[in-house]
Structures are given as C-alpha cells and as structure tokens.
Amino acid sequence: MVRLFVVIAALILMAGCQNKDRSGFLIQTQSSYNFEETLKILNQSIRSYDGLVQLGTIDHAKNAKDVNQTLKPNTVILFDNLQMATHLIECNPSMGLDLPLRLNISRNYQGQVFIQYTNPEYWSLKHNIKDKECL
C-alpha cells in the first residue's frame, strides 16, 4: 500500500501539482498546468516510470459528444503496476474491483484543472486488508 502511495505521489509531483487535500476517500490536487498539458505530463510520467503500464484512457467529454451532449474536459487514465496489483489481489481478491489504478483529470468552469484519485489508505479499509505484508 505504501509503495502504491509513493508511485501516485511521484506522479503528482512530476506533474507540478499541489496537493490540497489528503483526507477522505478521494484525493484532489490542483494542477499548475492547463488540461492538455496536465494530461500529457501524466501520460509521459506513467510511461517513463519503471514498473508502470498504461492501460488506456477514457475521454468522458468525447464520449458525451458522441451522444450529442457536452461535458467539460474530463479524462481518466488507467494504469497499473502489474507486480504490485497481483500481490494486492492475492491479499484480497476484491482488490480487483479497484484495479487498474485510475487518475481522473478534469477542468471546472473557472478553467482550473484537477487530478483526483482514490486515497490508497481507503483500500485497506474497503477491502479489510490487515496483513502487514499487504499493507
């Protein structure tokens, strides 16, 4: 769990973002860059970080447009550390519900860009993981 948090924190730091809130189930960080640059930096960071695999993206704004609706930019990046994911799923198969890892990048009406992700500490509660090897 701690290693996973370090990976996510490294990605956020590489993106030049400031962490605003570490409480609760979700962590939200405001980016120092516009939406497109934030997305580009995070994608590059994931691809360059040893052990991480980018599995895809979901462009919610494009999907909304496909059904004749509008949505502010909102993209989810799917990525994982396959070795760590396997270990976490061995600890509790229900971890498969929260893997692969996801970063949500969104822009609000004021043009501010945010990155949201699940607080890794929440997973130990949600999936009742108490084994020190898993934590």
Image (cartoon, rainbow, N blue to C red):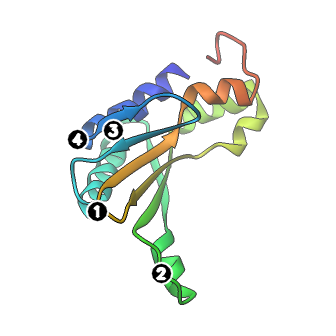
* Label located before the other in sequence (2 or 3): 3
At horizontal 47% and vertical 74% (from top left) the residue drawn is 71
Q: Which of pointers 1 and 4 indicates the residue nearer the eye? A: 1
Q: Are marks 2 and 4 in contact (CB under 8 Å)?
A: no
Residue at which label 1 appears: 111
Q: Dot 1: within a 10 Å radius of its alpha carbon, few (fewer than 14), some, or many (20 or more) residues? A: few
The type of residue carrying mark 2 is Thr
- Residue 58 to residue 49: above or below: below
Which residue appears farthest toward the front when viewing the image?
110
The answer for how far apart the CA atoms under marks 1 and 4 are is 17 Å
Q: Which mark is residue 12?
A: 3
Crowd around label 2: few <14 · some 14–19 · many ≥20 (10 Å): few
Q: Is residue 91 left or right of residue 34?
A: right
Q: Nearer the viewer, mark 1 or mark 3?
A: 1
Please determine whether, in this image, residue 113 is positioned above or below residue 127: below
Q: Given contact means CB atoms under 8 Å apart, are the residues at marks 1 and 4 in contact?
A: no
For the C terminus, give its image quadrant.
top right
Kind of residue indicated by mark 4: Gly
Circle 2 or circle 4, nearest the eye: 2
The residue at the point 41 percent across, 70 percent down is 72
Q: Residue furthest bottom?
A: 68
Question: Which residue is labeled 4 in the image?
Answer: 16
Name the mark on residue 70.
2
C-alpha span from label 1 to label 3: 19 Å
Looking at the image, residue 70 lies above or below residue 43: below
Q: Secondary structure at mark 3?
A: helix
